[in-house]
Image (cartoon, rainbow, N blue to C red):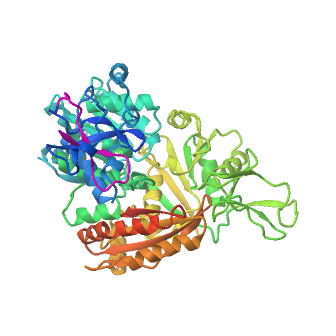
Amino acid sequence: MIVQVVVDAPLPAALEYALPAGANGAGLIGRCCVVPLGRRRVSGLIVGTAAQGSVNAARLRGVERVVDELAPLGAYWLQLTRFAAEYYQHAWGEVAVPALPPALRAPPGPRFGAVLQRMRAATLTQGVAPLPAPVLNDEQQAAVAAIDAAEGFVPHLLHGVTGSGKTEVYLEAAARRLARDARAQVLLLVPEINLTPQLESRLRARFPQLPVAVLHSGLAAGERSAQWLAAHEGRARLVLGTRLAVFASLPHLALVVVDEEHDASFKASDGPRCSARDLAVKRAQLAGVPVVLGSATPAIETWAHAQRGKYRLLTLGHRAGGGRAADVQVRMVDTRSDKPEQGLTASVRSALVNTLAAGGQSLVFINRRGYAPVLACESCGWLSQCSRCSTYAAFHKGDGSLRCHHCGWRVRVPSACPTCGNVDLRAVGQGTQRIEETLGTLLPGARIARLDRDSTRRKDAARAALEAMHAGAVDVLVGTQMIAKGHDFQRVSLVVVLNADAQLVAADFRAPERLFATLLQVAGRAGRAGHASRVLVQTRYPAHPLLQALARADYAGFARRQLAERQAARLPPFVHQALLTAEARAMAPALALLSAAQEAGAAGRGVRLYDAVPMPLERLAGLYRAQLLVEAPRRADLQAFLSDWLPAVAMLARARRPQVRWQIEVDPQQI
């Protein structure tokens, strides 16, 4: 018997291998195996069988091992990975094999059975003392009833204002699906690792008797493999994870939930550029089960689907538990008249002092790490520049370093200007560290904490900071986007937003969408217990339509305006895009490859190829980067064009090896 095997390599089709004599030929499809590839032994997946191969049997190499100790991957899982590979224009094995847990990505050895036994013995998340399910309001009950009544694949958009109790809708909908079938499994996706602990705790309290598996890249390899195995074997009834969990093996899937579905973190930034949000919808379709996409600020494309009736819209317009949107006053602080000092205006300073005096908690949001974005010489104009990227190196005062937040380059702060020798170097602008320092001076005795990537490098540091905030042991929390999403801070009565204007003038057409989502999410941390609260946004453009929509908490109005602008400009979702990028040690070879690719692309059926141009951040980690945008009015036309065009691009790139590397991204999120 001949078996067709996919491996983690950019191959156009599955490879053929001979099955060892005496091997059982039944139930092979979906099984992991070990095969020779060149001079290496690699893991693979059997995706097909045949009585006769396409090449001479004498030339076929044999499968070294079929992993019989593990049940095969199911048909839906194989269909999902194949769809992802085809849609995102990669080889099937490049998607399927990396989706396996660490224990299977390396060729399993002869003692793999014993390894599996140890993995099965690993303890899954155990239940805690159960908490009574809260009483749902009328809107929540209607949403749960709609999800529960869905037969087969039905996509839902759960649009709820911040604090409206979307999570309780997820949990009650999951409870009803799990109660129908003793084997049923539910998949819940969140955009970031630091959002898993809070939701995991709620799952454990809501379902104390059911095993919960957690999957994300922060887990040790053995733990992640054990959690994956529990899901694959049906022992885990609830699976919570980040984007990689969309490929978890769930043989009895009954419901899919994607929380904060708008979040850009669901789109992979390397390898096959898959969208876990979109694949979650496809996975539900293949399995014939409902899917719920939840957000206070849905992606514009998702909102358009709901407006066209492709997704069923469920609305939660009121806060749960007594908190009402009217309890939160959003006000713009005009920095043209109220000049900031050390990043804070007089209005904001007064509000912080008064909130502390009243015993409330404050959040200060600024989406910049470090002490200051740049260090400058006032004598000659020198600016701290990353030596490997076309961007500035931020000043980190704590360890006296300059750091690039794009490539990680780091150097000690110079004792004098490298250009003119001036010793008077000035920190320009504010980052989280500088704001933390300023608040310490403004609020002596206040308990101030900072939450950003620098303060949470130690394991469990983020969890500890958030637990302290929830317990009331912090008076003011300063942070980046890590404080904006999903946190139920009951004591916060003041939210301050700094440096919102940077994205108002960004060139990326998605920047307004991202900014509105971030600001509305941050604002939603206030007033969650029903107390009167304020949100102060420092800006030079208080009359900007985006900020006015924010003040009204009017997502629908904002989305309507965005869709009108995008339709007029022929932007997604009214066209479909792919982005071809190239990188090299110099800009010229990268642009040359893309220009040659443009010439090779005989665009038809409305497909348009734009000219090759440098990327906005044109140099990253020592490599120069360029891009070429491809557009088509119909998704099918774009896919057909890419399938024909990319093999030619690969041939052009091979002629330039190793000078230029290239990558294709379908549905790019940044251009």
**Residue under the image location 45 percent in, 64 percent down:** 654
Q: Is residue 651 visible?
A: yes
Magenta-span inclusion, residue 49: no
Query: x, y (%) of residue 5?
Result: 27, 44
Quadrant assignment for the N terminus: top left
| Viewer-side residue, 589 vs 201 | 589
User: Can the viewer see residue 138?
Assistant: no
Residue at 61%, 50% (x, y): give it. Answer: 352
Residue 59 vs residue 545: left or right?
left
What span is colored magenta in the figure? Answer: 1-24
The quarter of the picture where residue 63 lies is: top left
Left or right of 517 on screen, residue 638? left
Q: Position of residue 269 (x, y in %)?
A: 45, 55
Q: Quadrant of residue 34?
A: top left
Return the residue nearer the eye: 254 or 75: 75
Q: Where does residue 331 sit, x and y in percent of width and height?
A: 51, 62
Between residues 224 and 396, which one lies in front from this camera angle? 224
Q: Is residue 668 left or right of residue 355?
A: left
**Quarter assignment of residue 586:** bottom right
Up the image or down, 538 lies above or below 229; here it is below
| 8 with respect to 279 (left or right) | right
Residue 338 place in picture, x, y as percent: 65, 67
Residue 176 against residue 651 in the figure, above or below:
above
